[in-house]
Image (tube, rainbow, N blue to C red):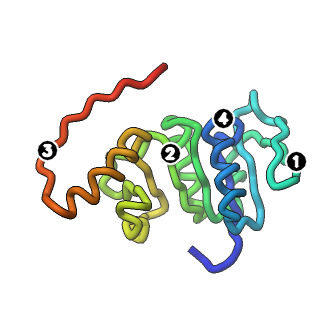
Amino acid sequence: MPNKPLSVAILGSSGAVGCELLKILAERNFPVSNLILLSSSRSAGKKISWKGCELITQEVVANSFSGVDLVFASAGGSISKKWEKVIKEHNAILIDNSSAFRMRNDVPLVVPEVNPKAVLNHQGIIANPNCTTILLTLVLSPLNSISNIKRVIVSTYQSA
């Protein structure tokens, strides 16, 4: 990443995860030069407060990614797949929070506390595991460094 503030787009900005991303960007004082809030047509026009400013969500269209350095996507796998090519054509890096790219060999699956250097091998897309898996890797990684884990059986129950 460049050593300058970045133009950031949040795809799915009006959803629960998008709102959390905004909070984290503010809490960590992420270097943002321009913040673009992208949403579906039904959420376009929604006002969202960020760092004392009122921003308005925009419907995502092909030129929404023009001049964007980094796209955080949290709008679901089908939306991420739909905009993948356009985001890459605009030379933005897509950090995807859906299941869309998790199983692709050309996309690093990153948990920053476990394998941060994996981001260096991206080809325009970085994925993260689901929430349960992220937490599990945080526990298993240090254990695996002590003794090689051969197998783990996990059952999870998540509310709908």
What distance separates the C-alpha of mark 2 from that of mark 3?
26 Å
Q: Position of residue 88 (x, y in %)?
A: 54, 59
Q: Is residue 94 above or below residue 37?
A: below
Which is more N-terminal, label 3 or label 4? Answer: 4
Please indicate whether residue 146 sits to the left or right of residue 49 in the image: left
Q: Amino acid at mark 1?
A: Glu
Which is more N-terminal, label 2 or label 4? Answer: 4
Q: Nearer the viewer, residue 145 or 160?
A: 145
The residue where tag 4 is placed is: 15
Residue located 76% across and 67% down the image = 33
* SS class, disc 3: loop
Q: Position of residue 94 (x, y in %)?
A: 54, 56
Which is more N-terminal, label 4 or label 1? Answer: 4
Q: Amino acid at mark 4?
A: Gly
Please indicate whether residue 69 sits to the left or right of residue 42 in the image: left
Q: Nearer the viewer, residue 93 or 136?
A: 136
Q: Is residue 143 above or below residue 77?
A: below
What distance separates the C-alpha of mark 1 from that of mark 3?
49 Å
Q: Amino acid at mark 3?
A: Arg
The residue where tag 2 is placed is: 97
**Mark 4 nearby-residue class (10 Å; few <14, some 14–19, many ≥20):** some
* SS class, disc 2: loop
The residue where tag 1 is placed is: 54
* SS class, disc 1: strand
